[in-house]
Structures are given as structure tokens and as C-alpha cells.
Amino acid sequence: MPVEATPCRQNSRTTVYRGAWCPYCNIALRALQQHHDAITARGARLVAVSPQVPDESLSLTEKHELVFDVLSDLGCGTAKQFGLALDLPGDLAAVYDKLGFDLQRINTGHPRTLPMPATYVIDRAGTIRWSFVDTDYTGRAEPSDILAALDSLD
């Protein structure tokens, strides 16, 4: 289901990741899982979003025993609205195919569009109060920076 920042009763912390096939995404999601209690203790809800079909997100959730929501942004529509969607050049898409990532299947017909990894802290009014975006897919927000951003909200 697509995600949008709408007013809610609690602050939220949203991370956008490329997919379960990405080792850097898996490391980042496990780190978030380790800090889940600290995030929720600050009154925030943790949500992860990827372009994968829901079954792939469910498999990832079960594999890593994630206790937070993992949502699907099919076709990267939300990522496009946030300016995060990138179309892979043909030669790079071919490399991903050779590595067996099968983005055609897991991204439901949008194999060449991936989001840049990003993290947002969104306040109760739906305003983005802190963000981390890196064009280098290996760069991710540090959990300590996320916690500090959440601490600054109140």
C-alpha cells in the first residue's frame, strides 16, 4: 500500500529502502530493529517502505523478525513524490539481473526504478522535521542521529 505523511497521534520515523535483496538495506533494517524500543519509547512509530510486492515485504519481516510495519510502494510512486526514485541505466539493470535479484518480479513490473535510501522523522502534524538522504546506496542514517532527531521534537 502506498504511504503518505498524514497527521497522526504520534511522531513517526520512516525509512525508505531498496529491497530485501540489498545487503545494506538488511543491515540497516536490523539496526532499526535493535533500536525499536528506544524509538517507540520516544512516542514514535517506525515504518519501512520499499518498492517490493507485499509478499516480499512479509518475507523480509519474518526473516528478520521485524516488529515494525514494512509497507510496499509499488512502482515507487511515493518515492517519486519525495524525489527519491531513480531509473537504473540499462547496463546496471543487466548486472542486477545477472546477480539474480529478479527486480521484474519483486517490484511488480518496475524493475528499473529504485528509491534512494532515505530516513525521515515526521511530526504529529505530518511535517518532515528531519531527513537523511544519500545518493550512495551504502550510506544510511545512524540510529543515534534518528534518536536525537526524535528527542528534538518535544
Image (cartoon, rainbow, N blue to C red):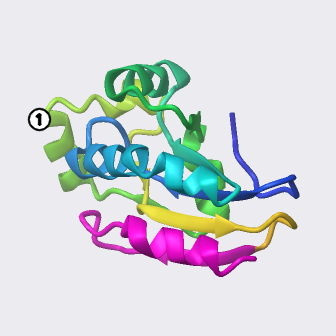
Does any portion of residue 141 appear in the rendered image? no
Q: Amino acid at mark 1?
A: Lys
Q: Residue 10 at what x, y percent from top left?
A: 79, 55
In the image, residue 143 lies in the stretch drawn in magenta: yes
Tell me where the magenta segment starts and ends, as one range: 128-154
Place of residue 109 in the rendered image (x, y in percent of width and height, measured from the top left): 47, 31
Q: Residue at x 39, y 39 (%)?
A: 111
Provide residue 113's location: percent of width, then percent of height.
44, 50
Which residue is painted at 50% across and 41% down in the image?
51
Horizontal placement of 95 versus 124: left or right? left
- State which quadrant residue 127 falls in: bottom right
Specify the quadrant that holds the C terminus.
bottom right
Q: Residue at x 52, y 47 (%)?
A: 37
Whole-percent x, y for residue 100 in the image: 17, 29
Q: Considering depth in this image, is 137 or 150 the residue closer to the camera?
A: 150
**Helix, strand, or loop for circle 1?**
helix
Task: Categorize mark 1 by other alpha carbons within 10 Å: few (<14), some (14-19), many (20+).
Answer: few
Q: Quadrant of the N terminus?
A: top right
At 51% across and 27% down in the image, what residue appears?
Answer: 53
- Could you tell whether 17 is left or right of 74 in the image? left
Task: Identify the residue under disc 1.
Answer: 98
**Apparent side of residue 65 relative to residue 36 in the rendered image (left or right):** left
Visible in this render: residue 16? yes
* Residue 127 is a magenta residue: no
Rendered view: 52 above or below 42? above
**45, above or below 137, in the image:** above
Relative horizontal placement of residue 9, taking residue 33 as reference (left or right): right
Which residue is nearer to you in this view: 99 or 39? 39
